[in-house]
Amino acid sequence: MKRLIFLVCLACLSAVFGLTYANEADEATLKQLTESFLKKAVANDVDAMMEYISANYNDSGKDGKAINFDAFKKTAEERAQKKSENSDIISTLGEIKTTIKAAGNDYRVGVEYNVKDYNLKDNKEIERAEKNFFRWAKESGGWKIIRLRKEKK
């Protein structure tokens, strides 16, 4: 009987430590994925950005309109087009601070970062602080963004 209790306790401890390790691994992966997505966004690489977005993406914009995968892609393409028309500006991503919280089967990732826009024509640099909130979920074995909220600081 004592042996059975010992084995059950051992199994429980293994499960707890295994779960903790998995969460830490997920958090490290999500931090890396979030930073990679932001770099693609600053570079206006729409195709690369869309690899991170879930086909089931569903959110609502500030105007209350539904935003799905296709609407997200269209908005990203319009933003990239506008940016390419003003080729005198080079943008770089500054330090990224992340907070990650488990939310059921997915994770919420809060990100604060700075973007520096350097205007070659005017020889001026403008720095802006931004804050985003990502919701990541596992789909087909990989992590995908199912929601993204942007907030100006």
Image (tube, rainbow, N blue to C red):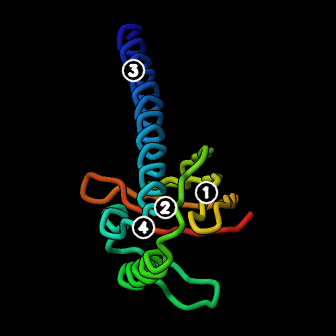
Q: In the drawing, what numbered circle is on residue 66?
A: none
Of mark 3 and mark 4, the one earlier in the sequence is 3
Q: Measure the C-alpha gap from mark 3 to mark 4.
A: 53 Å
Instruction: Find the residue positioned furthest to the left.
Output: 140
Q: Nearer the viewer, residue 128 or 134?
A: 128
Q: In the drawing, what numbered circle is on residue 44?
A: 4
Q: In the drawing, what numbered circle is on residue 8?
A: 3
Q: Which residue is mark 2?
A: 42
Residue occupying image coordinates x 48% and y 44%: 31
Q: Position of residue 12 (x, y in %)?
A: 43, 25
Amino acid identity at mark 1: Val
Residue occupying image coordinates x 45% and y 46%: 30
Q: Which residue is mark 1?
A: 115
Amino acid identity at mark 2: Val
- Which label lies toward us, 3 or 2? 2
Instruction: Give the secondary structure at mark 2.
Output: helix
Asked if residue 68 shows in the view, the reply is no
Q: Measure the C-alpha gap from mark 4 to mark 2.
A: 5 Å
Mark 2 and 1 residues: CB-CB less than 8 Å, in contact?
yes
Residue occupying image coordinates x 43% and y 61%: 43
Amino acid identity at mark 4: Asn
Q: Measure the C-alpha gap from mark 4 to mark 1.
A: 13 Å
Using a 10 Å C-alpha cutoff, classify the residue at mark 2 as few (fewer than 14 neighbours), some (14 to 19) or many (20 or more).
some
Instruction: Give the secondary structure at mark 4.
Output: loop
Instruction: Give the secondary structure at mark 3.
Output: helix
- Which label lies toward us, 3 or 4? 4
Mark 4 and 1 residues: CB-CB less than 8 Å, in contact?
no
